[in-house]
Image: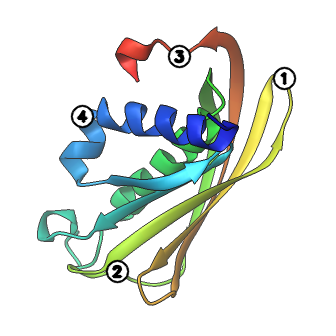
Amino acid sequence: MDRDAEARRRMAQMAGHDPFMRGLGLEFAGGGCGRAAVTLRVRKDHLNFNGTCHGGVIFALADTAFGLASNSHGAIAAGIDAHITYQVAVHAGDVLTASATEVTRTRRLGVYRVDVTRADGTPVSAFTGTVYVTSRPHDPKHG
């Protein structure tokens, strides 16, 4: 199996064991080594008091893609810093995709960029995150 196929298998397994993803309706959509895509159809229970998608839901979507991409190599990587900006409002029924890309990775640190877009290609959010890479491999029983 090639490295990207192994990374996709690993990420699909992690996503399948993640009750938070299931609860929010997040779906792993693909990726490879250092890359991941996660989708979400915005539901009414994702909306805030203004009637638009809660920023925390969008953050969770981006953070999930970040987590999968940074853990795609097989070693446990834990987020140590994250920043997000929001460009447009999102409404119930919108389909969002968070696409994470590895910017740099050393033995101990990785930096990732996540772009969140609507299905029509409109940029919704930009997220950057840094992980600390441990020397411990993932436990298959825990994704």
- Residue found at x 68% / y 44%: 34
First in sequence, mark 2 or 1: give its number: 2
The residue lying toward the viewer, choosing from 36 and 51, is: 36
Q: Secondary structure at mark 4?
A: helix
For the residues labelled 1 and 4, the Cα–Cα distance comes to: 29 Å
**Residue where numbered disc 1 is placed:** 107
**Residue where numbered disc 4 is placed:** 19
First in sequence, mark 4 or 2: give its number: 4
Q: Residue 128 — which label?
A: none
Q: Secondary structure at mark 3?
A: loop
First in sequence, mark 2 or 3: give its number: 2
**Residue where numbered disc 2 is placed:** 90
The residue lying toward the viewer, choosing from 141 and 60, is: 141
For the residues labelled 4 and 2, the Cα–Cα distance comes to: 24 Å
For the residues labelled 4 and 3, the Cα–Cα distance comes to: 17 Å
Q: Quadrant of the N terminus?
A: top right
**Residue where numbered disc 3 is placed:** 138
Residue 62 in sight in this render: no
Question: Residue 84 is drawn in which quadrant?
Answer: bottom right
Mark 3 belongs to which amino acid? His
Q: Position of residue 117 (x, y in %)?
A: 50, 76
Q: Quadrant of the C terminus?
A: top left
The residue lying toward the viewer, choosing from 104 and 13, is: 13
Q: Secondary structure at mark 1?
A: loop
User: Callout 4: 10 Å neighbours few (<14), some, many (20+)?
Assistant: few
Q: Position of residue 43 (x, y in %)?
A: 17, 69
- Residue found at x 41% / y 83%: 119
Q: Is residue 3 above or below residue 82?
A: above
